[in-house]
Image: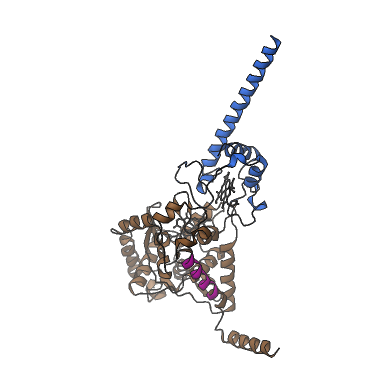
Chain colours: A blue, B brown
């Protein structure tokens, strides 16, 4: 009985966690697509999504699920740290996206294979 | 040692003659032409110049082997579908009435002083001669010269972006095109060379909170897309203004277009007529030196 109870709690916690993550991914995708926010689609193709684009100034984003979260965060926060000549704007450093928003975008990028 | 002395003597003689104040600009212009001709020569170089453009797009939608004079067509020089739409749009050019209106303004406007535009601009075929560096005034664009003429004759200056200003410039451009005029920007003093250098620096500097430079999009980026829109090359940019833009549903000047790009970079737009804008335009125009004046034109 006790064991059963524990298992139920674990399942419930896992379920809320994945719900929260789903919301985060959704939020991140929205930032990615929206002109006034990340506007990432202006330069990047993802999964062939077509919203008035995607552009070809940046690479097609793929296999990002394999990237460590920190590396994705850093790329969005300030791409010049890994590529001083990057044409990609530093969305965190310049204050366009907040810490919370970048984390949402990272959650979305982690779903990209 | 002797060689160096000779070289420096030759250098200073040329300097005294004032023959080479445009030396840096001329070098830049030739390098830019070489860059774009190479970039659009052949899809073999695509990996270098278009690293992220899908292969099918390069195969199917690009024209290659583009030469200097063709770059004045902007993205329509290389973008096949865009070119077809452009040719369709130009069958019934929406700017004909603007040229007519500009001609009226040129011939019929009477200033408070009793003079007219003809007194300031006896020859209307001058679209390729501006911006000019004028001692005491700095760089003056065509719009600036028109407003100087108005103010000197007791009139209010016009909005530099559109309306009457664009109409009169359309007439100047059309007349210049008819007479086969070319872009003919002169750099003939130390001050002019310095103004050019500042304009060039502005063009290549990262701007606004997005930290993009004009060159990110119109030099390296030319031929790539932001969203669905191909970015046109710097070379040829000034040849065809004022431009009728479908988005504006009206004619606009170069200053108006640059304002739009300033916003896209996340930068508060610079004022038309400001030193920054004038010197940027001076640099841009010099890059197109020798190309035929081809305005007004139409763009999406």
Asked whether residue B114 appears in the rendered view, the answer is no
Nearer to the camera, B194 or B45: B45
Q: Is residue A69 left or right of residue B229?
A: right
Nearer to the camera, B23 or B114: B23
Locate residue B161, reporting x and y percent. Answer: 45, 59
User: Can you tell which quarter of the image residue B8 is in?
Assistant: bottom right
Rendered position, B52 above or below B123: above
Q: Is residue B161 left or right of residue B21?
A: left
The residue most toward the front is: B44
Residue sitting at x 42%, y 69%: B67
Locate residue B99, reporting x and y percent. Answer: 33, 64
Locate residue A86, reporting x and y percent. Answer: 60, 54
Residue A97 within the segment the image draws in magenta: no
Residue B37 within the segment the image draws in magenta: yes
Locate residue A61, reporting x and y percent. Answer: 54, 45
Residue sitting at x 65%, y 90%: B6
The residue most toward the top is: A1
**Magenta residues, as a range?**
B26-38
Q: How many marks?
A: 0
Quadrant including the N terminus of chain B? bottom right
Rendered position, B263 above or below B138: above
């Amino acid at each position: 009985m006790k064991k059963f109870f524990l298992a139920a709690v674990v399942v419930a916690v896992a379920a809320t966690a994945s719900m929260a993550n789903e919301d985060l991914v959704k939020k991140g995708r929205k930032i990615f697509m929206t002109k006034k926010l990340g506007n990432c689609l202006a330069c990047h193709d993802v999964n062939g999504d077509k919203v008035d684009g995607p552009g070809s100034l940046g690479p097609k984003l793929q296999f990002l699920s394999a990237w460590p979260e920190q590396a994705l965060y850093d790329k969005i926060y300030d791409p010049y740290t890994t590529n001083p000549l990057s044409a990609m704007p530093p969305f965190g450093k310049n204050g366009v996206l907040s810490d919370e928003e970048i984390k949402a975008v990272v959650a979305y990028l982690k779903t990209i294979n | 040692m002797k060689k160096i002395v000779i070289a420096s003597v030759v250098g200073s003689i040329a300097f005294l003659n004032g023959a080479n104040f445009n030396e840096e600009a001329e070098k830049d212009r030739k390098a830019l032409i070489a860059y774009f001709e190479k970039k659009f020569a052949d899809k073999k170089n695509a990996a270098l110049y278009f690293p992220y453009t899908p292969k099918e797009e390069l195969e199917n939608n690009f024209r290659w082997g583009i030469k200097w004079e063709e770059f004045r067509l902007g993205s329509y020089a290389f973008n096949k579908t865009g070119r077809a739409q452009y040719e369709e749009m130009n069958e019934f050019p929406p700017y004909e009435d603007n040229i007519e209106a500009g001609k009226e303004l040129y011939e019929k406007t009477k200033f408070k002083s009793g003079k007219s535009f003809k007194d300031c601009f006896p020859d209307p075929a001058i679209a390729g001669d501006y911006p000019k560096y004028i001692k005491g005034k700095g760089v003056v664009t065509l719009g600036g010269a028109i407003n100087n003429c108005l103010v000197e004759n007791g009139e209010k200056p016009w909005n530099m972006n559109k309306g009457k200003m664009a109409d009169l410039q359309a007439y100047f451009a059309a007349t210049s095109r008819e007479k086969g005029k070319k872009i003919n920007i002169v750099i003939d003093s130390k001050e002019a060379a310095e103004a050019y250098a500042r304009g060039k620096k502005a063009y290549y500097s990262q701007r606004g909170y997005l930290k993009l430079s004009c060159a990110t999009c119109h030099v390296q980026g030319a031929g790539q897309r932001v969203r669905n829109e191909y970015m046109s090359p710097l070379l040829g940019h000034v040849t065809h203004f004022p431009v009728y833009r479908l988005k504006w549903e009206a004619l606009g000047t170069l200053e108006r277009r640059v304002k739009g790009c300033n916003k896209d970079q996340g930068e508060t737009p610079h004022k038309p007529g400001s030193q920054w804008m004038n010197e940027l335009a001076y640099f841009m125009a010099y890059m197109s030196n020798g190309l035929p004046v081809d305005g007004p034109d139409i763009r999406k």
